[in-house]
Image (cartoon, helix red, strand yellow):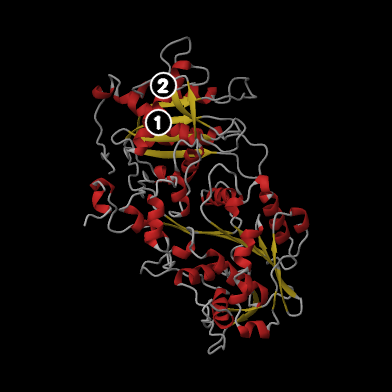
Amino acid sequence: MVTAAASVAEEDLPPDVIEPVALGPTWKRDESGRFVLPELSLGWHVLSWTAQYLQHSAGQPWRYTPEQARFTLWYYAIDPVTGRFLYRDAVFQRLKGHGKDPLAATYAATEFVGPCRPSGQLAGPGHPSGVPVGQPLGQPHPEAWVQLAAVTQSQTRNTMTIFPSLFSPRAVEEFSIDLGKEVIYAHKGRARIEAVTSSPRALEGARASWSLINEPHHWLATNSGHEMAAVIERNATKSADGSARTLAITNSYEPGEDSVAERTREAWEAAQAGRAVDTGLLYDSLEAPPGAKLNAAWAPKVIEAVRGDATWLDIDRIVASILDVRNPASRSRRFWYNQVVAAEDAWLAPYEWDACTRPDLALSDGDEIVVFLDCSKSDDATGLVACRMSDGHVVTLGVWQRPPQVDVWNVPREEVDGIVDATFARFRVLAFFADPGTGEDQDDGRRYWDRFIDAWAERYGARLLVHATTTGTRRHAIEWDMGGDRRRQEEFTAAVERTHVDILERQLTHDGHKVTRTHVRNARRRVNAFGVTIGKEHRASSRKIDLAVCMVGARMLRRLVINSSKYGKRPRARGKGRVIVLG
């Protein structure tokens, strides 16, 4: 019998072990290989309480999977210094069918009548709850108001229908639970769970102690999703005890829709990259690795890797759906690989860029490199990217963007100047192009970067093998102004197209810089008279692409140097470069 995998070309076969992309502390391990757990967590009491008062549909006591239990401990982690919750909000992103609604329902039940707030006491030896010694004990919220929010009633119904079978008879009796269809009460109405949909005005001012944001990948501006999310955040912020929190459960979002899920992921990535303040968002996701293919050989192993503990998922049926030609590949990657795919006009998909990440190929002192600088005064970012001559490895040397919550700001030119000097001191720079951009220098009326670019040309121009401007009235070793120059636009467009092919064929490697990844992800395909180039999603967009421009420019500059007559005649250095070809 010939299997489907046997018909796949050898280069399309998966490795023996597929490692998923794991986001969040749930997946961190120590040196011995054991999962890292928070120092203090109310989650231990939550695990104990849910086992006593909640049940599976078959009537058995509720038990979390190991993966769910670890997430519970981190979601309820407590700061040892302040005694407050470590995380204000959380996102639990998994593939379709993972069991996100039942998990969220157990937290809603805990926030409803369980030990959801720190009592200020720690468990001692032999505590009846079974909480480990030294871990915090919880107490019920005195005015529990749990909201299950979604943009449609069908979304809230997925969770609300779980409660009648989730609460054990003991819980119903002990907490006087009244199981209604739209509102569930306990303690004679002092605590409640309610389902709410797209009515931001009705939600304004609500005293919710805990909110579930259900399927925020469907929360859009057109269905009041953005306004709903903003109201929920405001209500949680002004809670009397300061401990109101939210949990979002979601599938991977559709890029370009500007959903609440997309905004949340981008905010988390910005905080991880140091471009925004970390406000206490716990993001937990298990995603297919960047190079995962959608074929009969890869799919079973990928699903097994990204489903985590959700062993109830039928891998054969999911693979059949993936291989069904009626289902778009982008949808399969979103729903079953839990990958963030590309917008329709995206230049690259995030996983295509991620597949070329090689942080181990770091630059070494004395390496021969070329450097491209894309300049801005204030609105756009200024980026400096190097490309090693020996193997084309791309490294981000610096990026300067307006800090969050700062209105008036200019790029610190002296700081950029220092990085440029340090680059020339450490490496053998064979070429250096700088696009000066626009913006006026208030001191002399020239362009903001002219004085510095001229100084660099005077300082380093004689040692460069390729000069930026060799014709016209303003010949210059470094200034490479693409604005309005058709020849340079054609040259850059060709470089964009070559770089795109190199990435898809894994002939390009990069250091995995987080901000560069964001800029590459933001880049959109734009057709001009010379082919396909890159641009922002629209002129006024705040989503920067400057480092993507620098990366393409550095690769272009490497090719120019290789094709120059001086390259073969240069004095040889004791380089440490390596030629790397990714399969």
Give the farthest residue toward the left: 1
Looking at the rendered structure, the secondary structure element under dot 2 is: helix
Q: Which quadrant is the C terminus positioned in?
A: top left
Q: Residues within 10 Å of mark 1 (few under 14, many from 20)?
A: many
Q: Tell me: residue 447, above or below residue 149.
A: above
**Which numbered circle lies on residue 491?**
2
Q: How far across and down, in percent of the image, does residue 248 sit?
A: 59, 59
Which circle, 1 or 2, is nearer the viewer? Answer: 2
Give residue 378's position: percent from left, percent from top: 61, 33
* Tally of numbered discs: 2
Question: Residue 203, image x and y in percent?
Answer: 75, 58
**Amino acid under label 2?**
Glu
Q: Is residue 357 visible?
A: yes
Between 242 and 507, which is closer to the camera in this rendering?
A: 507
Q: Quadrant of the N terminus?
A: bottom left
Which kind of residue does numbered mark 1 sit on? Ala
For disc 1, the marked residue is 554
**Residue 221: quarter of image:** top right
Q: Nearer the viewer, residue 174 or 89?
A: 174
Q: Decide if residue 562 is on the left or right side of residue 437.
A: left
